[in-house]
Image (tube, rainbow, N blue to C red):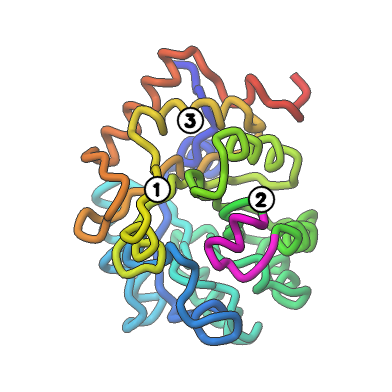
Amino acid sequence: MLARYNAFGPYLKKKFGTIVYKVNVDAGFTCPNRDGTLGVTGCIYCNNDSFRPSECRNEMPISQQIENGIKYLSVRYKAGKFLVYFQPFTNTYAPVSELERLYREALAVPSVIGLAIGTRPDCVDGEKIDLLSELAREHFILVEYGLQSIYDKSLDFILRGHDYRTFISAVNMTKQRGIHIGSHIIVGLPTETREEMLSMADEISNLPIGFLKIHQLQIVKDTRLAELYALNPFSTFGYNEYLDFLVDFIERLSPHIVLQRLFALSPDNILVAPQWGKTRQEIIKDINDRFVERDAVQGSKCLTCRH
């Protein structure tokens, strides 16, 4: 069957010769947008319970969290190797000595072949990149920079605390160091038109980014965004509208970029909008079906790619 887009799971299986899954861990980091350095409330959409697995808690050592995750994933998904995903908050926001201790503890677990590190582009520096580059000599190291948008007007709206130039600076610091570079974006912000959102595919395709997560904007409880939405509701993606948008976006995206995630799925008990009433499996099937219906392929309309 034709691979319509460059998905993360098949990429890892081809690279490592077996099923590879991420094991989520909580290392107890905070964020400069919460500890008072930049702010105390975080980005306006941020509620870490919207994406953190219930078993991912920092009360137990990293190695124990990993072992627990491996036991589950080995049985449930027949995974043979694992990436440790440092996920909640900002996972380079600590002294280098502390980062090295945590990263090496994770890499010492048998069957762990690398790390995925979620962080902010304003929380890396030369010394931290040197550490990651050293680890990358023997392991798969993926740094996932939260971009969210290429538009400063949107970054201001979500109280991100950095601009787009900061992201570009972090990417330039990281490239050509043996480190895989990933990015997260949010589509559906009320500050952007549909064409502005689609244009992010053109921009990202022109950057040294190898991996991408795409999330539709979700409004979840206990966030500033939920308060704003309650006062002045704005439009969010309808289900079929998002399927078509996603296909349009991926058609404009470089075929070399590996897609780690195509949508967000917050728990129903905290999700305000949009409420689609779909399971993860149903959404994936509908995305794949929409690609087939439209005979769409990643990169077929990429404006910056050589065909």
Q: Residue 244: horizontal and vertical position, in percent?
A: 44, 26
Q: Along the horizontal axis of the image, is 116 left or right of 196?
A: left
Q: Residue 15: horizontal and vertical position, in percent?
A: 56, 41
Q: Residue at the spot x=34%, y=61% of the render?
A: 231
Numbered mark located on residue 234 in the image: 1
Q: Nearer the viewer, residue 16 or 288?
A: 288
The residue where tag 2 is placed is: 150
User: Is 156 one of the magenta-colored residues?
Assistant: yes
Q: Which amino acid, by three-letter code, is at mark 3?
A: Phe
User: Is 206 one of the magenta-colored residues?
Assistant: no
Q: Which amino acid, by three-letter code, is at mark 2?
A: Ile
Numbered mark located on residue 245 in the image: 3
Q: Nearer the viewer, residue 68 or 55?
A: 55
Which stretch did the figure color magenta?
Answer: 152-163
* CA gap, disc 3 and disc 2: 18 Å
Q: Residue 32's image quarter?
A: bottom right
SS for dot 2: loop
Label 3–label 1 contact, CB within 8 A:
no
Q: Residue 27's image quarter?
A: bottom left
Q: Nearer the viewer, residue 96 or 215?
A: 215
- Mark 3 or 1: the one toward you: 1
Numbered mark located on residue 196 in the image: none
Residue 41 in view (yes/no): yes
Q: Disc 1 or 2, which lies upstream in sequence?
A: 2
Q: Disc 3 or 1, which lies upstream in sequence?
A: 1
Q: Residue 7: horizontal and vertical position, in percent?
A: 50, 36
Q: Which amino acid, by three-letter code, is at mark 1?
A: Phe
